[in-house]
Image: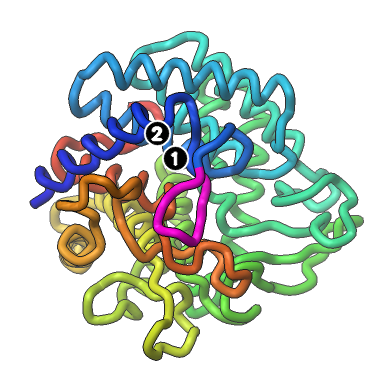
Amino acid sequence: MWQRAIEDAIQKTRRNIEAFPMQFPHITTERRYDWGINRDWIEGFYTGMIWLCYEYTGDPAFKETGLRHVEDYRERLAAKRNLDHHDIGFLYLPSALASWIVERHESGRRLALDAAEHLMTRWREAGQYIQAWGPEGDPQNGGRIIVDCMMNLPLLYWAHAQTNDDRYRKRAVLHAEKSRRYLMRGDDSSYHTFYFDPADGKPIRGGTHQGFHDGSTWTRGQAWAIYGFALSYRYTGDPAYLETAKRAARYFVDRLPEDFVAYWDFDAPVEPGTPRDSSASAIAACGMLEILAHLGEADADRGWLNEAVERSMKSLVENYATIGEPEEEGLIKHGSYHVRGGLGPDDYMIWGDYYYLEALLRLTKGIPGYWYER
């Protein structure tokens, strides 16, 4: 089953490259992607899919496209085009760093380091956190962190390992600690966002941007927490991060519906038409596979984690994948972006496609994506 799903993903990625050369997918509400320039926070996932396809197939056409993409990301960073946010890791880990991991492309390594330095400009010394959105001093977002940023911290951890410059690691750890303390709740659920006073860093309140309400648990945010804290454990060895990741995973798994694919928010009323978020389940599967990579064979948590990954991925392949629909541009249906905002409430999500493929390759080939050196 995994093999068939991988082959289908490779075929669709190849077709998209040929149909939309040097263009990048953006989200629609029309069961397709809107192809255009590299300008959003999501393009890295598509480039990451291309590198995954190259690793699996060895086809030089994928490598050539991946390297051409890296040059596009280089131009974007030089122009500072739409980079006034924290999602620099999402953009440059699956693109520039991937070219270094897979091909030892020195120019890609250098670009990833430059991207890490750009991410450092999001650091707010007074508050001791990485500001998610907007310019410093922004009246709405100046004191806001979001759980997604846990997946951007690996760029800083990696830069520290490459340069031995302790600034990168210190700030990544401080942000991870602040996220663990304020974004994670006592019941192991997560806030999507948290606000601090930008003048002195005093905590104000938890909230949401894309969840059902401020106190709800947005499922994609919970998935980012699972994977992000597991990656912070990989880089730091701090057992508190692994424990946080496991507890976040347990919360996620215990609230899944019968088919093991999440709705968009764990607190949203479930009724006919309530959107799913297949992308959240794909991310969570990758996060649980990352957790499993750190557990001994006799660890008591291996059983439920393995079962959860198996059931989630089996359901995604059998019930959500576009296998047998060769003209479709996306890999898995019923992802959600911003349900309350009416943006992609039930469609293809390129990050969902990426993590779905990463999970399949982790399961079959041990290829773990581009969040750390191998």
Give the residue type at disc 1.
Answer: Phe
Residue 232 to residue 155: above or below: below
- Report the span colored magenta: 26-34
* Callout 1–callout 2 Cβ contact below 8 Å: yes
Q: Name the residue: 43% across, 25% down.
A: 21
Main SS, magenta region, reads loop
Residue 330 to residue 144: above or below: above
Q: Name the residue: 38% across, 53% down.
A: 352
- The quadrant of the rendering that contains the C terminus is top left
Give the residue type at disc 2.
Answer: Gly
- Inspect this view and state whether residue 317 appears: yes
The image shows residue 133 at horizontal and vertical percentages of: 73, 51
> Would residue 126 appear left or right of 305 to someone viewing this image?
right
The image shows residue 22 at horizontal and vertical percentages of: 47, 25
| Rendering quarter of residue 8 | top left
Mark 1: which secondary structure?
helix
- Inspect this view and state whether residue 243 appears: no
Location of mark 1 (residue): 45
Location of mark 2 (residue): 48
> Would residue 240 appear left or right of 144 to someone viewing this image?
left
Q: Is residue 32 magenta?
A: yes
